[in-house]
Image: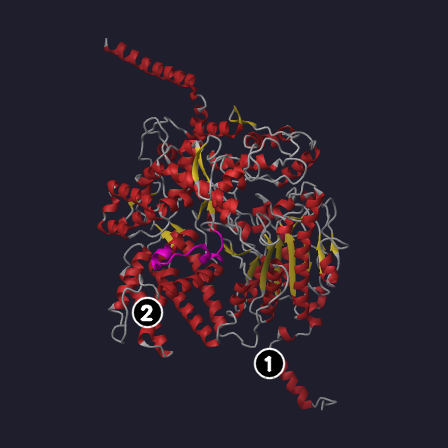
Amino acid sequence: MSPKYFTRRQALKALALTIGLPLLESVTPLGLLSKTAFGAPARRKRFIGCFFGSGCYMPNNQNGDWGFNGGALSPLEAAGHRNNTLILRGYRSIDNYDPHWSSTAGFLSCNEIQPLSADNVAFASRGVGVGCGKTFDQYVADARNTSQRSISVAWEDQNFHDSGQAREFGMTYVNALSWRTDNIANGNVIDPMAAFSRLFAGSTNQSAVELQQKIRRQLSVLDGYKKQYGSFAKILSAADQRALGDSLDSFREMERNLTALETADTSCQLNYPNIDGSLYDRNFKAYNRIIVRALQCDTIATATIMFHNGIGDNRALDNLGSLHGCAHHFNDPGTIERTKAYTRIYTSILADLVTQLKNAGLLSDTLILVGSNMSDGNLHGNANIPLILLGEGNDIKFGQEITPPGDITNASNNRQLADLYMDLSKVYGLNLNSFGEQNSKSTGASSEIFT
Amino acid sequence: MNTPRLRDLRLLLPAISISALAFLSSCGFLSFGSVKQKYGISSNEQSNNNVMLTTASGIKLLSNQEYVWSVSDLVGKSYDLSLVSGWGGNTQYSGFDALIWTNLDSKAVSDRLATAETVANDAINSSQVMSCGVSNAGEKAWGGCPSRIVTAFVEKAFRRPASAEELSNFRSQYEAAVNRARTSGAGDSDQFREGIREVVATTLMSPQFFTRTLPMLTADEYTRKLTAYEVAERLSYLIAGTLPDNELMASAKSGAITQPKEILAQARRLFDKYHDRFVAHFFGQFVGYKKLLIGNPTDLHRDFVTESNLVFSELFKNDRPIEDYLTPGFTFVNNRLASHYGISGGFDANFSRVETPIRGGMLTQGSFLAMTGVPILSNHPPMGQPIKRGIWVQARLLCNPIQPTPSDLLQEIGIVAGNIPADLPLHERLAVHRSNSARCENCHRYMDPVGLGLESFGPEGQSRSFYDAGQTKPVVDRGELLGKNFEGPTAMSALVAELPEFKHCVGERIMNYTLGQTTSTRTNSFVNSLIRNKNGQSPSFKELILRVVTSQSFQTLTREK
């Protein structure tokens, strides 16, 4: 029986409780989460960066196929997500080298990649080896401090590039979208079962006891590593100590992940998602479910999804041929159609991701940024790259399209991606003074994404 | 009287030098001038073997392949690359794996941890590792069997005896694992096995195993000779891609390996022992054809790789000079490959040697041609194929890597390409493209005329005289390289083989591979000393590597004062 009136005692108790407890974000009504006073952007908790290499059909950097009304975004519309989609026109990609390399590594960091040559002393401060820049998703991960840091998933890793152009550049630049620090790239998990094991503690054929034993054994091995590292580091030069020291942080992170798994809330689990369809479709839709559940469990707050790195062959979509070959379509109508088909595969998977987030009640505090390293792959255009922001709420112009003034097909008239990240940083409560570097550094200009 | 004579002599020396230069020029050495300018070569027979390289870095990861071979040798079980299939790819330089340090992220740690567990499970069932056993509580104590197993295993894995501190750490870990197993009710034998399993996994996760590290110089050191164990490790990974074998470890233990004669003898022994592995591993990266075996290779692609390995094996075994790798004069085919190449004769499924000037060279093998081939998808032969092949020749054989096209230029190319009449012959279309602007010409003059020389090979390496079945579009395979004209792949291969740039590039890439040294202007003098002729003939690949391993740079760490 619910009381008609509050008694004085009840009101005082409620007041005491309100004063005594901090406001729990997770119990805040959705209406308050998405709209705050004075027009400030609502605080969001989760971020997913999605990427596909080699662009889509956007001839001469025009909008081309990247839109609704029968275009590449149609699968989002068909799934009822048009009003959750903000189309961002007129952004240029990071382009200090072949955009396959620089604009993949730089998509979420707006930093420039650097050659591996020992002669490249200008960027020695980044440390040893491959270097780019810390990515936006990792700033969000820092702010949220979830039990596991984040996860990056992809279709495959590219191991070779034979044209001879990459003598001084590592394959890491095309294989990694997320960089934890300036010189540690987060490798992509390329098998959904591996992603599942990582976030949900193992395959289903392990008993709880076996799992606990395995975790304890692995923790013990990591502990052993730290001791052996301590012995080893004594004989290393300062530079080598730094190189290994950077990696030591990754061992610590793994230790933290395992500890979190050991004490994981057993009520927040997931059965491995078995999905029908082609291997490619199956893998990514499995990733969608694993990521959404891990976000829901607060196991992670950020993830990146690389649909394709844009170079090399594609193993599963043989009927469409090599993606890179399609992207360089040379205006051949059949090849253009195959390029379009590729993009629709990505946006169909995206539509599934948004549906999953909606169903889990997470879309209002999640943002998904989707883009590529170039506009039309045929010309490697770095102007007006395909870019959308997906989410829910009245603070951001979802359901609209923002086009800056001037000729957006010309990169020099384009907006900096870093300015977009600066605005997104406000949404996540990050205190960034600037984002990106050199020619790709934020300028202070507004992205105009807020209502 | 003496003074004028001395003056005469001073005049005579330049005169002789000028005459000699004129003679050399007239003998066809004129093109050498460009190389001399570029690389600062003073003599093609330069005999200085003491040019030292400053050491670039002391640490690198084992490549995925090196890791797999190393754990195979440790455990006595033959693993293949599927053991590390979920791991990230290796960073490459000049086509070679893992020459540069790459930081590990948590995913890499997770992958390595899972693999270490797999190998550790195999290790405790391996008689090679488990050289003794325990049946009671006393025997499982550290001092006996466990200590013997761990000491031997760690010494092999670390490529040197473990330090007292390292062994003490392993002892603690062994005992902790044994205690944990006892708590969960395991018997003595299982407790012992659990302890060994954990030590094995930790060994594989230790940087002493998964990195190759040369401890760098202290602040007041400028040079240091490598220890015997460091030399053995370096030599073993260079030739065998794995841990030193027992004989090499014995040589390191006695210190003999630091002697020039011994290192040469050990290198030759390792080349013999690991001949097939070395040829496939080294040339698979040098040319890049290992790529053809990734995923689900076709039978034809497997045949291509076999052909390449057999040809290079023959040349390497017989110490043939590096030029012969372009113009061997023979190849190996089976019935499938003979049919594909259009070579007549009686062949079966086994590979047999065929004498032919047309096939078998680096540029005329199916492996290279398939890697760089572009299929005809429309009515016109693709401009991309000669461009791709030209880029490869420049980058991998002449060490003249052509930088990727800036995006603004690509847009210009798109417009230009759209305006080239599609029905023109391929070589004319490429010429129209080059003539569009200096920016086009500047790069494409290095690619197109070289790649055109290989147009009589289709995208899968098949011979062709026409692009179309109706024989209306004839192939033109005339090209030009460094001002010299040629016609057809055989003439082109011979021309590349003669170029000093080719020889220098091979030396440069051998340096990249053997010492992990990236190329810079500072490395030219080392390369020049490496590629010197012997008895008027270019060195073989084996000779080049032997020169490196017997050089001071291989056995010494140096930094600039």
Against A211, residue B532 (above or below) is above
- The magenta stretch spans residue B87: yes
Indicate whether residue B534 is drawn in magenta.
no
Residue B174 numbered tag: 2
Residue count near mark 2 (Cα–Cα under 10 Å), binned few <14, some 14–19, many ≥20: many
Residue A153 percent location from the top left of the image? 56, 59
> Where's residue A256, x and y in %?
47, 68
**Rendered view: B552 above or below A46:** above
Q: Quadrant of the N terminus of chain A?
A: bottom right
Residue under numbered circle 1: A20
User: How busy is the neighbourhood of tag 1: few (under 14 within 10 Å), some, or many (20 plus)?
Assistant: few
Q: Which residues are magenta?
A: B70-89
Q: Which numbered dot is residue B276?
A: none
Residue A235's spot in the image, x, y percent?
Answer: 33, 54
Judge from the rendering whether residue A25 lies leftward or rightward of residue B361; answer left or right. right
Mark 2–mark 1 contact, CB under 8 Å? Answer: no
**Secondary element at image label 1:** helix
User: Where is residue A204 drawn, in percent x and y?
Assistant: 52, 72
At a point 35% along the width and 53% down the height, the residue shown is A236
